[in-house]
Amino acid sequence: MDKNQHAIQLMKEQKYEEAAGIFNAIIEANPDDPIGYINFGNLLLHINDTERAERFYNRAIELDANAATAYYGLGNLYYDKQDFPKAQKRFLQAIEIGLEEADAYYLLGMTFFHQEDYKLALPYLMRATELDSEETEYVFQYGLSLAQSDHIDAAKPVFNQVLELDESHSDAHYNLGVIALFEEDLQSALDHFDQALAIQPEHVLAANAKKQIMDVWHNTDL
């Protein structure tokens, strides 16, 4: 195990001071190698020292304009600050350089999602699910973006895929219930809202939707 790997392992064990000491020694020994700055930036970001983390990432980029993981680190930093336009720019740079990782595509897609540009989020969230089809959150957010973009027919099988990955996903049931309402299948909608509430009794949206269905049926019986 080399020094970088050892320091990263110490980070995972939450031994941050020891990890910082090793990263600092690596930088002193190799001041023109961007990897040390990127790893130290990751550590600083992990402990919420965002100001210093930003400096370390930028230093790595000064040393190597194609340091994709430095752009990715900056993207995470801005994403955590909810500065989605800045995060979007950095994730896009990382991907353009060649960072072909599901998380980068997912977070880039979510920068658009949080700005309610659902159609622009779609290709990146779709790519994230292609790279990691077992990650429930990637699949769910892709389905949600499809639904928000009025691609209801395409969203339905995606939400069903979420339930295949996690049968206790209450929000997938809720969204399938909403789709069933669009399809005018009240019984199927009620079944999904009931399942959402069985999983998450405080699911307010599912409870309200169920109440609306029950009110319709009650008024119809009258």
Image: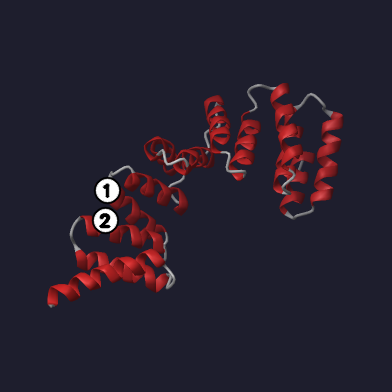
Please provide percent x and percent y for residue 33: 76, 26
Name the residue that disc number 2 marks. Answer: 179
Rendered image quadrant of residue 179: bottom left
Q: Kindly identify the amino acid type of the residue bearing the numbered disc 2.
A: Ile
Rendered image quadrant of residue 55: top right
Could you say whether the residue bearing mark 2 is in a helix, strand or loop?
A: helix
Left/right of residue 102 with respect to residue 45 in the rendered view: left
Asked if residue 188 can be seen in this view, the reply is: yes
Name the residue that disc number 1 marks. Answer: 152
Please provide percent x and percent y for residue 207: 35, 69
**Residue 172 vertical placement versus 152 (above, below):** below
**Residue 114 vertical placement versus 57 (above, below):** below
Please provide percent x and percent y for residue 188: 23, 65
Q: Kindly identify the amino acid type of the residue bearing the numbered disc 1.
A: Ile
Could you say whether the residue bearing mark 1 is in a helix, strand or loop?
A: helix
Report the residue at 66% width, 32% height from top. Answer: 70
Marks 2 and 1 close (CB-CB < 8 Å)? yes
Asked if residue 135 can be seen in this view, the reply is: no
Q: CA distance from mark 2 to mark 1?
A: 7 Å
Seen as rendered, the residue at the extreme bottom is 222
Quarter that holds the N terminus: top right
Report the residue at 27% width, 68% height from top. Answer: 212
Q: How many numbered marks are there? A: 2
Looking at the image, what colour scheme do you see?
A: secondary structure
Front residue of 4/216: it is 216
Q: Going from the N terminus, do you reach mark 2 or mark 1 first?
A: 1
